[in-house]
Amino acid sequence: MINKPDLRVLIINPFGIGDVLFTTPVIKAVKGCYPSSFIAYWSNLRVKPILESNPQINKVFALSRGDLKKIYQESFFSGVWRAIKLASEIKREHFDICFDFSLDYRYSLFAKIMGIGKRIGFNYKGRGRFLTNYLDIDGYYNMHVVEYYLELLNFLDIPVCERKLFLDVFPGSELRAKCVLAASGIEENDFVIGIAPGGGGSWGKNAIYKHWSALRFAEVANKLIDKFKAKVIILGDESERDIAEVIVHSMRNKAINLMGKTGLEILPGIIKNCSLLIANDGGPMHMAVALGVKTVSVFGPVSETVYGPYPEDRNHVVLKGDVVCRPCYKNFRLPICEKDKECLKQVSADAVFDAVVRLLS
């Protein structure tokens, strides 16, 4: 335990929505032990809105290495200026500690250069050489990522106060979400079910390996409209718009297509207004879990033990195929699938529909 009530802490995580939400129990524990602490978060640009809505986070530096690389490609001088500006802003805060979840030695090296004396994280493939305190890992395996993250608190003797993801919604964002829903024909008392058929922006072109069939999403949506008179809304990233088009054109009933129309400033508010979310493994599913919305998720190459809904709860059902090679995503690598996504194909539309009915009963 550090005897400094106004501890200044930097959280480093350049990954996607789910991974950022996985760090929220660590933030809550630090804030619980040091109520007067100043906590800042260094993230990528895309996830900035969900961090700014967290009242436990005092400041957000939203500019990852990946973001800087894109800026450099457009303009070398803009990239240099943004990098210098970021370094200046971080150094100005005089952080005492950083929790580095990046698994990339360059972030902890940067933290060292910035004068952050205590640097805590994971030593994966020797990449923790600039950390002062670290856990040796060769990947995430037999327990949830959140549990790995919480183990880092032991270096500061900080107790875990709550094993639960946290996501807040700004009142203004929730109002904008309600306006979007109203403009789409959804009224206050409608029964709303969300569908997130993508695989997450952070996976890029490999996200396709997490996609359950769009035609089966359409089949489930039709059945839910027939049985519950539900309003079904399709949610996701702009890059996933083609999936939504397949679903909409395959349905005999009408779904509301909001794919690419709700940025992260609004999406949490939209999900919060759903009674349940059906999704692949990805950020929207974890957002729903954090918001207390029931979920039915389909997992393919990724382990639900490591990356599934956290914590395990009867309100969150995970469905997956029984294939001996599953899960194949290990050591942060996805091998070439030789079975044409059989692990996903084994999950039927009836199985997903039945799981939804059970959760809503």
Image (spheres, rainbow, N blue to C red):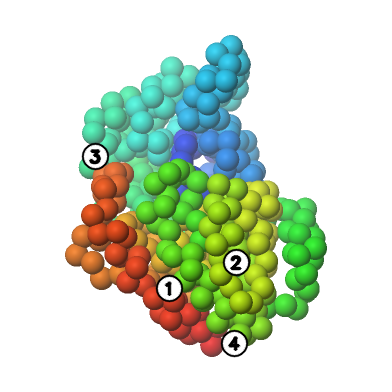
Q: For mark 1, give the secondary structure.
A: strand
Query: Residue 190, can we see it?
Result: yes
Q: CA distance from mark 1 to mark 2?
A: 27 Å
Rendered image: mark on residue 249: 2
Three-letter residue code for mark 4: Lys
Rendered image: mark on residue 272: none
Three-letter residue code for mark 3: Asp
Camera-side mark, 3 or 1: 1
Q: CA distance from mark 3 to mark 1?
A: 32 Å
- Lower position in the chain sequence, tag 3 or tag 1: 3
Against 321, is 11 above or below? above
Residue linked to disc 1? 317
The reply to whether discs 2 and 4 touch (Cβ–Cβ < 8 Å) is no
Q: Residues within 10 Å of mark 3 (few under 14, many from 20)?
A: few
Three-letter residue code for mark 2: His
Q: CA distance from mark 1 to mark 4?
A: 20 Å
Residue found at x 37% / y 54%: 209
* Horizontal and vertical percent position of residue 321: 30, 69
- Lower position in the chain sequence, tag 1 or tag 4: 4
Closer to the camera in the image, 268 or 252: 252
Q: CA distance from mark 2 to mark 4?
A: 20 Å
Quadrant in the rendering for residue 185:
bottom right
Q: Residues within 10 Å of mark 1 (few under 14, many from 20)?
A: many
Three-letter residue code for mark 1: Val
Residue found at x 72% / y 77%: 190
Rendered image: mark on residue 227: 4
* Horizontal and vertical percent position of residue 28: 52, 51
Against 16, is 175 above or below? below
Query: Residue 305, can we see it?
Result: no
Residue linked to disc 3? 136
